[in-house]
Image (tube, rainbow, N blue to C red):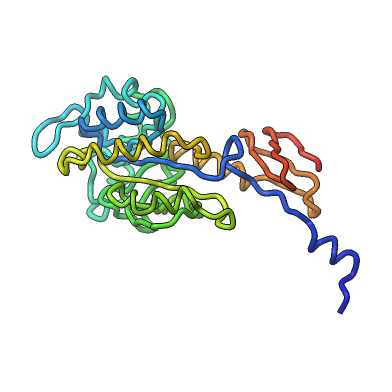
Amino acid sequence: MKKSKEQEEISGMEKYRFLFPEWKKRALTFSYDDCTECDRRLVDLFDRYHLKGTFHLNAGKLGTTGGDEDYILPDEVEALYEGHEVSCHGYFHPFFSELTKGQMLTELLEDKRTLERLCHYPVRGMSYPFGEFYDELVDVAKAVGMEYSRTVEDSMNFNLPTDFMRWNPTCHHNKVFSLLDDFLHAPDWLGLTLLYVWGHSFEFERENTWDMIEEFCKRISVRDEIWFATNIEIKEYLTAARGLVSTVDENIIYNPGGITVYLEHKGDRLTVEPRSFLRF
């Protein structure tokens, strides 16, 4: 059966698609927990290679010593993590499954309040202590203003997150080299790819793997096609890009958000500015 003129026009349409900032198709984000003194060395490493990380801190442990680990000082939080992101991890790093709902609220609110006073900006994300998460905890986290939270369930893929409050990372840093070539040479049909690496900085010290993470940073930092971002930057951008509004014909696009979104249409690179229209 022969297609109508309208059907041929529809089947021949080239849809626009959003890309990462600067029209990049790959992104990398790091996520590290617990605020031990090893964060100093890891932050220095990221800074040297112009990478960005998100650091999930337990405000109640700042400045404490003893046990297996020593923790960074409250007074160094702002300067140490400048250019990166400070995020929540529970005030005392509790098992949330052992807390009442009121205690959950206190743990997250006090962590958020203390960290905001130290870093002087709104703290908007977290990671789940011990990887515990369930519906009630997710609801409490959202109620106190958390916009995303990371699990410890490795996806082993580069898919974009669909549920930011149950955000599965790609892999722990010990597995990252097994996926690096696949990430760097991902086929175009796979779409946008995100490599999300997580861990604890003290693991590099315990396992004597500082050379490993530095080699990874060195290899990845020279790749101009990768967008290096914090967790909240990934969340903000994807929210803005997915929030674009278009006509049915997709010849007029409106960006109701506050972030410039980068697009590709028929081989052309375009941008749609905040609260602006783009017409093809």
| Residue at image point 26% right, 38% down | 91
Where's residue 144, x and y in %? 41, 41
Left/right placement of residue 55 relative to residue 130 reads right
Relative to 158, say whether 23 is above or below: above
Front one among 16 and 105 = 16
**Camera-side residue: 2 or 7?**
2
Quadrant of the drawing holding the N terminus: bottom right
Q: Residue furthest left?
A: 67
Q: Position of residue 184 (x, y in %)?
A: 46, 47
Residue 194 against residue 113 in the figure, above or below: below
The residue positioned 23% from the left and 43% from the top of the image is 93
**Which residue does the image show at 85% across and 65% down from the upper left?**
8
* Nearer to me, 183 or 14: 183
Residue 14, located in which quarter of the rendered image? bottom right
Along the horizontal axis of the image, is 280 left or right of 112?
right
- Residue, far right: 5
Q: Is residue 253 left or right of residue 82?
A: right
